[in-house]
Amino acid sequence: WSTLGPDGTLLDEISAAQRLEVAANEDVATNTLIFVSQSVRSDCETCFDSEETKEMPAGSFSADTLPYYICGQGSALGPRVLRSGAMSFEACVRHGDERVRLTAQFAPEPSA
């Protein structure tokens, strides 16, 4: 994810890994996002880099409870109002077996 300022400058950037686990005898998949919260880069040959991660549950899914399907070439969801007062939207596009998903959120600049 990239966070941009009002003038389009890059303020922050973060990436996440995704883990999808399916229980042995169940039709439920659990989705977890894994973020790097801190990282230390070594500057010597005998040292090593280290990273601390945090996990965020992203939901559980089964064939009967999928939030939506993309049957055509694409879909759009939103805007939705978040608990923080910000708004979010999501756009998905499909071409053959390839899919692209864009999720963005925005909030009004706080008044001084």
Image (tube, rainbow, N blue to C red):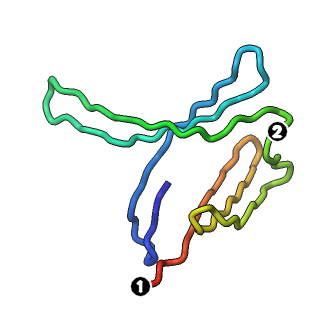
Mark 1, residue position: 112
- From the image, tell me which residue sits under label 2: 65
Q: Quick check: marks 2 and 1 in contact, CB under 8 Å?
A: no
Name which quarter of the figure residue 30 lies in.
Answer: top right
Q: Quadrant of the C terminus?
A: bottom left
**Residue 5 spot, x, y in % from top left:** 43, 71
Judge whether 2 appears above or below 40 on screen: below
**Which residue does the image show at 75% across and 50% down from the upper left?**
94
Residue 35 appears at what percent x and percent y? 45, 41
Image quarter of residue 73: bottom right
Q: Which mark is residue 79?
A: none
Q: Is residue 30 left or right of residue 65?
A: left
All told, the count of numbered labels is 2
The amino acid on which the numbered mark 1 sits, given as a three-letter code, is Ala
At label 2, which amino acid type do we have?
Thr
Q: Nearer the viewer, residue 106 or 98?
A: 106
Q: Residue at x 24, y 38 (%)?
A: 41
